Amino acid sequence: MRVSKLTLQTSSGLHVISVTLAVNRIEQQRGLKGVRRLADATGMLFLYGPPQEVTMWMKDTYLALDMIFIRASGIVHRIESPTEPLSRTVIASKGEVVAVLELAAGTATRFGLQPGDQVLHPAFVPGGAWHPS
């Protein structure tokens, strides 16, 4: 899996995060399963094709997470926080998105991240024309 940097633009400033990219089905299914600790300022960015309703769950994930659902323009659509480790409860984007950013639980609050904030990364371009290859 590839690692990349992204920036969260919030009312409290810019926050740079190192993310592992999950682009294909195998990487997305593996996700953060089995991970027991997530370092500060790190996470996983799940990238999908065209905008779509996305559902996630926490089966085999030992960490409570913040799930940030992101529109094609890079705008934060919704935040689910905290998620319940090892849960089979489905967590839905509740709207069309192209990405989900997973961070350690509490990170979104610590950064002041809210729906409507901007995520800066090459995956999010004006007009939302980028698609994973």
Image (spheres, rainbow, N blue to C red):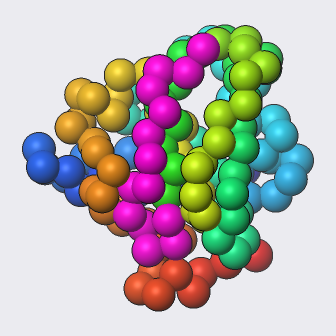
State the extent of the magenta-drawn residues as a range.
Answer: 71-84
For the residue pair 86 and 5, the one nearer the viewer reads as 86
Residue 69 place in picture, x, y as percent: 52, 50
- Residue 106's place in the image compared with 43, above or below, is above
What is the quadrant of residue 35 in the picture?
Answer: top right
The one nearer the camera, 90 or 24, is: 90
Q: Is residue 32 above or below residue 49?
A: above
Tell me if residue 129 comes above or below residue 54 in the rendering: below
Main secondary structure of the magenta stretch? loop
The x, y position of residue 92, in whole percent, is 65, 42
The residue positioned farthest toward the front in the image shown? 94
Residue drawn 73% across the image and 31% down it:
90
Q: Say if residue 31 shows up in the picture.
A: yes
Residue at image location 76% in from the left, 76% down from the top? 133
Identify the residue at image location x=11%, y=44%.
12
Question: Can residue 16 be seen in this snapshot?
Answer: no
Residue 13: where, in percent of width, then height? 13, 50
Residue at 72 percent of width and 44 percent of height: 55
Q: Is residue 78 left or right of residue 53?
A: left
Q: Is residue 78 magenta?
A: yes
Q: How many marks?
A: 0
